[in-house]
Image: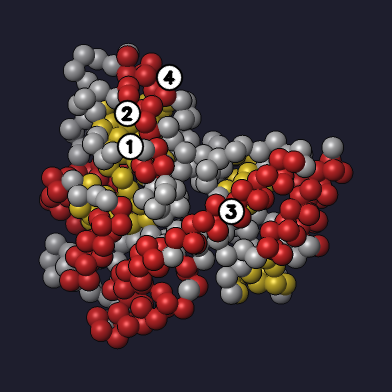
């Protein structure tokens, strides 16, 4: 795989690419908080007060009070019993799995699960099997073939990044044995899904019993860092045995300060989530009307069907002519050959959305 070309972000919705300024419909900064002046101000304030780095593990001398404050606010935002912050979203499910190693006799993982979950499953020290993507019936078949007394961990994304679809968590819980547990990596769903942004659990209308929710602050929250939202019992186990937590230097205090500001903004400005839903619905509806075969998902991600190499080149050219950066991506397993994946943000202007709709509609008419 070749290294991606560098992009310089300009304002909320543009990038500088090969000396051109282009409208940006990609990435995962769904509310464009990464370039919000209030987060920058909070980071500068925390930098002045606490420095750039605690330079030690939280198990030793690096357990700064700002982490306790952030964990309390995250638990409150998501409605969890407690929270544990890690320096990166990728580490959150790994830390949970390390703490639970040897407690489960099998792991069942969605075939399109993100890499962090794949690696987390390997750390459980038990056989790992894949079930069909978002298929509760196939999951049930695997569970039915399990040995008597088996203890199962199910691993799945909350919202899948390749197309914005959501795992049927309620259906999974119906077939999950009482001694089983589900590890949900809600990197993309947290802050976006649900009436108040609590993520895929809130969207599915399920409680936290038998579920460990992991999230990242680098997407909807526009900052950085990971979090495990769980019980006090599991938190204690991670503190004692989660090497991804024990052996890492924690989140830099300025980023923790910015994360606190992001939580405050998303709590106090529900209009952002409404705009995100409205913008996504507008684009999806227009493209469906134009004849595009796209999946209707709750996430702000619109994935076009696979195309021939010639069509890919033509659409890239049309997007560039309209001063839109072409978001052509490859997802192992889910879209290995490459697809156009457009991410809609709450802060995209009506003119920017209309331009995207016009280009894709015209291309569909030509394509037939």
Q: Which of marks 3 and 4 is nearer the N terminus?
A: 4
In the image, residue 28 sits, relative to residue 252, either above or below, namely above
- Cα separation, mark 3 vs mark 4, equals 33 Å
- Cα separation, mark 4 vs mark 1, equals 19 Å
Q: Earlier in the sequence, mark 4 or mark 2?
A: 4
At x 63%, y 58%, the residue is 25
In the image, residue 236 sits, relative to residue 147, either above or below, namely below
Which disc is residue 173 wearing?
Answer: 2
Q: Which of marks 3 and 2 is nearer the N terminus?
A: 2
Judged from this view, the residue extending furthest toward the bottom is 48
Residue 138 sits in quarter = top left
Which disc is residue 137 wearing?
Answer: 4
- Cα separation, mark 4 vs mark 2, equals 12 Å
Q: Do the residues labelled 1 and 2 touch (CB within 8 Å)?
A: yes
Which mark is nearer the camera, 4 or 2? 2
Q: Is residue 292 left or right of residue 229?
A: right
Which mark is nearer the camera, 3 or 4? 3
Point out residue 339 in the picture as x, y percentages from the top left corner.
65, 44
Q: Are marks 3 and 4 in contact (CB under 8 Å)?
A: no
- Cα separation, mark 3 vs mark 1, equals 25 Å
Find disc 1 in the rendering and name its residue: 206
């Amino acid at each position: 795989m070749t290294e991606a070309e560098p992009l310089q972000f300009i304002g909320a919705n543009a990038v500088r690419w090969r000396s051109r300024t282009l409208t940006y419909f990609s990435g995962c900064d769904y509310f464009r908080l990464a370039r919000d002046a209030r987060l920058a101000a909070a980071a500068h304030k925390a930098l002045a007060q606490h420095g750039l780095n605690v330079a030690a593990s939280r198990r030793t001398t690096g357990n700064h009070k700002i982490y306790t404050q952030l964990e309390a606010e995250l638990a409150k935002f998501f409605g969890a019993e407690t929270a544990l912050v890690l320096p990166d979203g990728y580490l959150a499910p790994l830390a949970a799995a390390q703490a639970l190693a040897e407690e489960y006799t099998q792991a069942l993982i969605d075939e399109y699960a993100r890499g962090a979950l794949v690696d987390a499953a390997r750390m459980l020290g038990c056989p790992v099997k894949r079930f069909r993507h978002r298929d509760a019936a196939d999951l049930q078949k695997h569970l039915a073939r399990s040995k008597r007394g088996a203890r199962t961990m199910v691993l799945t994304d909350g919202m899948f990044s390749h197309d914005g679809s959501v795992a049927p968590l309620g259906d999974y819980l119906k077939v999950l044995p009482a001694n089983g547990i589900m590890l949900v990596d809600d990197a993309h769903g947290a802050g976006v899904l649900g009436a108040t942004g609590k993520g895929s659990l809130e969207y599915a209308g399920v409680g936290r019993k038998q579920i460990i929710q992991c999230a990242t602050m680098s997407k909807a929250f526009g900052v950085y860092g990971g979090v495990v939202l769980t019980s006090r019992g599991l938190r204690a186990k991670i503190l004692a045995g989660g090497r991804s937590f024990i052996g890492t230097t924690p989140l830099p205090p300025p980023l923790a300060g910015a994360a606190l500001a992001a939580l405050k903004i998303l709590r106090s400005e529900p209009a952002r989530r409404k705009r995100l839903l409205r913008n996504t619905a507008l684009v999806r509806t227009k493209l469906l009307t134009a004849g595009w075969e796209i999946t209707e998902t709750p996430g702000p991600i619109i994935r076009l069907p696979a195309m021939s190499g010639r069509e890919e080149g033509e659409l890239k050219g049309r997007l560039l002519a309209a001063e839109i950066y072409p978001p052509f991506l490859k997802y192992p397993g889910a879209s290995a050959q490459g697809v156009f994946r457009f991410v809609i943000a709450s802060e995209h202007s009506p003119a920017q959305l209309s331009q995207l709709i016009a280009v894709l509609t015209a291309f569909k008419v030509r394509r037939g």
